[in-house]
Image: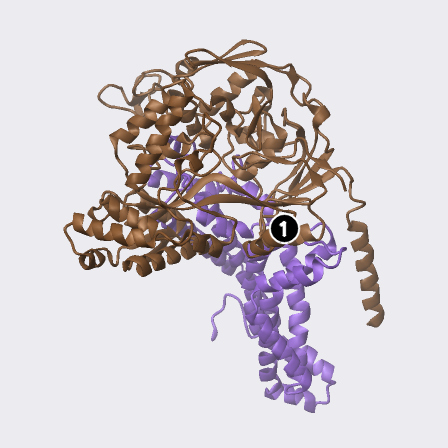
Chain colours: A purple, B brown
Amino acid sequence: MIGYYVKRLLSALFTLFLIATLTFFMMRAIPGGPFTREKPLPPQIIAQLNAKYNLDDPVIVQYFSYMKGIATFDLGPSFKELGLTVNDLIKQGFPGSMKVGFVAVMFILLFGIPLGIISALKQNKAIDHVVMVMATIGVTVPSFVVATLYIYFISSKISWIPITGLSNPLAYIGPAIALSGYSLSYVARLTRSSMLEVLRQDYVRTARANGLSEWRVIGKHALKNALIPVITYVGPMIAAILTGSFVVERIFSINGIGRYFVESVNNRDYTVIIGMTVFYSALYIVMVLLVDIGYSLIDPRIKLGKRSGD
Amino acid sequence: MKKLFSVFVVLALVLGIAACKGSVEDNTLFWNIGADPLTIDPTLNGASDGGDVINQTFEGLVREINGVVYPGIAEEWETSTDGKTVTFTLRESNWSDGTPLTASDFVYSWKRGMDPRTASEYAWIWEYSNVVGSLDTVYWTDVCDNATDDCNEYDDNGALVGTDYSDDKDDTTGLTITEQLALVGVKAINDTTLEVKLVNPTAYFVSLMAFYHFLPVKQSAVEAVGGEDGLWAKNPALVVSNGPFKLVKYTAGEGLRLEKNEEYWNKKKVYIAAIEGDFVDLETTAYAKYNAGEYDFIPSVPSMMIPDLMALSDEFYAYPLLGTYYYSFNLDKPEWQNAKLRKALALAINREDITEALSGGQIPATGFVPRGFIDNEGKDFAIESGNYGISTGSGGEAEAVTLFAEAAAEMGKTVAELRTYLNGKVILYNTNEGHRMVAELVQEDWKQVLGVELTLQNQEWAVFQNTRKQGNFDVARGGWLTDFMDPAGMLAIFTTDNAYNDPNYEKSAYDTLLSESQATTDMALHFQKLYAANDMLMADMPIVPVYYYSDIMMAKSYLKDWGRSVLGSVDFTHARLER
C-alpha cells in the first residue's frame, strides 16, 4: 500500500516537471514578450526591463534557474504586477476563488446528486421530465449569461444582496449559481443514468426480494455503486472549480485567481503562466488521487496498487 | 423541513441586513476605478487607471484641469530669453506626513524616473522633455564590446570566472550611471527654487509637468523596507504623497479608500472628505452598480448603452482624447508607394458609418492630428489645418475614383490592372471585435467605391505587434495617443527611424520641419513649421486616419465641479457632493 503511494507521488512529481517544462518552452516559442504594449516601448527600455528580470540570459539558463525556483516552491516574480511574486498572487487570489468554489461544489453535490436520484426513481414521471429539462438548460446556458441575468433581475433589484465582492454570505449565491450551473446539471444527469443502470442489477432485485426497506436498498446498496462514475467526474471538477473562473470572477468582481489563467497568457507574463499551470496541475493530480482512494472505499472490488487477478 | 427553511430565510435576512452598507456617508464619493492598477507610484505608472488614482493623491509643479494649466506646487515659473532655462519657484508645502516638500524632492524623483535601474516603463517620456542629459540617462546602455572592453570577469586571485557583459560604463559616453546622472540639467538652487536646463526651447515643457511621470515622490517612502518596486504607494503604512487626497486603505483586487489630505497646500478648496474606489473591471457590472446607486462616478459604460445614454442621459459624458485610430500603408512595398493611390483609399471611406457602428463616442478623423491642440493664436490646430478633402461621412467617393484612375496611369497600369494588382492584399489587425468591425467596413468601402478587394487577417495582440514591427504587412491598424499638449507629440512619430513609424515614412523635409519646430522659442515659427509638416504628411498620406479616440464616463448629477485632464485622468480636487 505504501509502495503504491510512493509510486503515485513520484509519477505526480514527474508529471508536474513535464508540465512545467512544456509550458516554459511553449510560451517562449510564441511571438511577443511581457513588455509588448499598445504603445510599443523603445528598445532601450525593453532591454532594461529584460535585464531586471534576467530575461536577457539565454533561454536554457532561464529554464534551469526557473526549475530550481519551482523545486523550492518559489514561482518567481510577476513581470506585470510590479513588486509581486507569483506566490503572492496565489496567496492573494486563491482564498477568494476557493471560497466561492467551495460553495459551488456544495451546491453541485447537495442538489445534483439528490436530483439525479429522484429522477431515476421517478423515471418518466413528471418530476423526472422537469429535472431533465432543467439539467439540459443548465448544461447549455453559459455561466456569463446566468451571471448577467442574476445581476440584472436579482441583485441589482434587491438592495440587501450585494452585486459584487464577497462582503457577506449572500454575496456567494450569484457566483456559486453561475459557477455550478453546468456541473450541477451534469452530475444530476450522470447520477440519474448510473442509478437507472444499477437499479436493474440482480443484486438490487435480490435485496428487494429479501424484503429490505426501499430506503436501505437505495441508500445502502444501489447508491454506492451508482456514485462511482459521479466520483470520477467530481474529482477533477473540484480542482477546476476551486481554481476559479475568469468569467464569473470578472462579472462579480471577485478577487480570485481565475483571471490570471487568461490575462497572464495575453500579457506573456511567463512566470505567472507556468505558476498557474503548475498550481492547477498539482491540485488536479491530488484530486485524481483522492478519487482513486474514494473508489476503494466505496467499492471493495477495487484495491489500490493491486492488479486485477492478483 | 419547513421549519428549517424558515430558519434559513430569517438567518439570511439578518445576515444580509447586518452586512448592508450602513447609512451612506454623506461626503464620501463612491467611484469605480476599473481594473486594479498595476502600480500607483507616479514614476513607475504607465496606465490610465493608475493615472486616475495618482491624479488624486499627488500633485506636480502644475495641475492641468480641462486643458488649463494651473500652478500646483510651483507658485510661478520663468523661462529665460533663449528658452533653454526654466526656473520654478515652489510654494511652501508639505508631504502628507507633515514634512516639508522641497525642490530637491523633484530632483530626486526625476532622476529616479530616468535612471535605467528603476526600469520605469514610461522613462521614454524624457525624450520629449528635452531636459539636458535626460535622454543619455534613460538610454544609458552597457553591453560589453570586446573591441574596447575587457569583458571577462575575474575572482580575487585573478582567475577567470566568467564573462561579464558589463564594465558599468555606457558604451558610447564611457560614463558610469552616477556620472551620467550628475550631468542631468535639473538643480535645486534652494528649497523653493528649481532650475531646469533644456537642450532646445520646449513650448509645452510646463504643461508636460502635470503628467504623472513628473510628479514628486519622497525618497524615504520609496526606499522604505517592503516598499520595493512601487509597493510603498499601495501600502497605507508607508505611503507619503502630496495631493488633495491620501491613501488610507488598499485591498488588492477589491478597492481602496482615499481621505482628504490635511497637509495639502490648497486644502481649503478640497470639499470631499473621502473617496471609496472599487476595482470592478467589467463595464456591465459597474454600470449595474451605478444604476443601483452604489457609485457616483464610473469611467466607462457598456458600449451598447452608449447611443441611448448619449441621447437621453444628462449624466453621460464623452470627451475627445488626444489620439487617433488609423491604418498604416507599408511604404516599403511597391504596391503602396503611389501617393495618389493612398489618398484615393483614404477618401473612399465613410467614417461616420464606422463611428456609428462602434457607437463609443468616437469622432470621424479628417486628419492625423485630433482636435484639442491650441496654437499660438489660440486657434485649434486641427480645425485650422482643415480636412484635406477627407469627408466625415460619404462625399469623398467621386474624388477617390478620379485619384485612383490617376494613380493607375502613374503606375503604368489600367484601372482594371491596378485593381487586380491590389486584390487579395491583406488588412491586418489584432484580434478584437471592434477592430474587426472597422476592418470590415473599410474593406467594404474600398470594394464598393474603388472595386478593390482586400482580405482581412487578424492576429493575437503580441503576435500582431511583432508582425507589424517587422514590416510583414500590407495595411495594418495603428493607434496613437499623445501625452502632452503639442501637435508635435502626434506628428513626431512619423519621422525617420521613430520606433512608432509603422508605415516607414521617410522624408527628410518632414524630419527637418519637425526639428526646426523644436529648435525655436518663437511660438509663431514653432506652429508655422508644424502646420507645414502636417500639410506634408496629409499630402503624402502614409496612413488612413479613421477616427479620434474618445473618453466616456458617467457622473451623478449631484456630483459637481469634477474635472478632467485633456490627457484623460479624472480630477476630484475641487469636486463637491450635493446629495
Residue at (34% x, 18% y) in the render: B169
Circle 1 crowding by C-alpha within 10 Å: few under 14, some 14–19, many from 20: many
Q: Is residue B90 above or below residue B379?
A: above
Residue B7 relative to residue A235: left or right: right
Q: Considering the image in quadrants, where does the N terminus of chain A appear?
A: bottom right
Does dot 1 land on a helix, a strand or a loop? helix
Which is nearer the eye, B75 or B98?
B75
- Percent position of residue B228, x then y: 54, 29
Q: Residue furthest top?
A: B190
Please give the count of numbered marks on the rendered protein.
1
Residue B530 relative to residue B234: left or right: left
- Percent position of residue B180, x then y: 39, 16
Chain letter of mark 1 equals B
Q: Is residue B533 above or below residue A155?
A: above
Q: Is residue B175 above or below residue A171?
A: above
Residue B263 visible to an observer of this rendering: yes
Residue B116 relative to residue B532: left or right: right
Q: Residue furthest left?
A: B412
Residue at which label 1 appears = B286
Instruction: Tell me where residue A224 sits by quadrant.
Output: bottom right
Instruction: Tell me where residue A114 sits by quadrant.
Output: bottom right
Residue A80 visible to an observer of this rendering: no
Instruction: Tell me where residue A186 sits by quadrant.
Output: bottom right
The amino acid on which the numbered mark 1 sits, given as a three-letter code, is Ala
Which is nearer the eye, B295 or A18?
B295
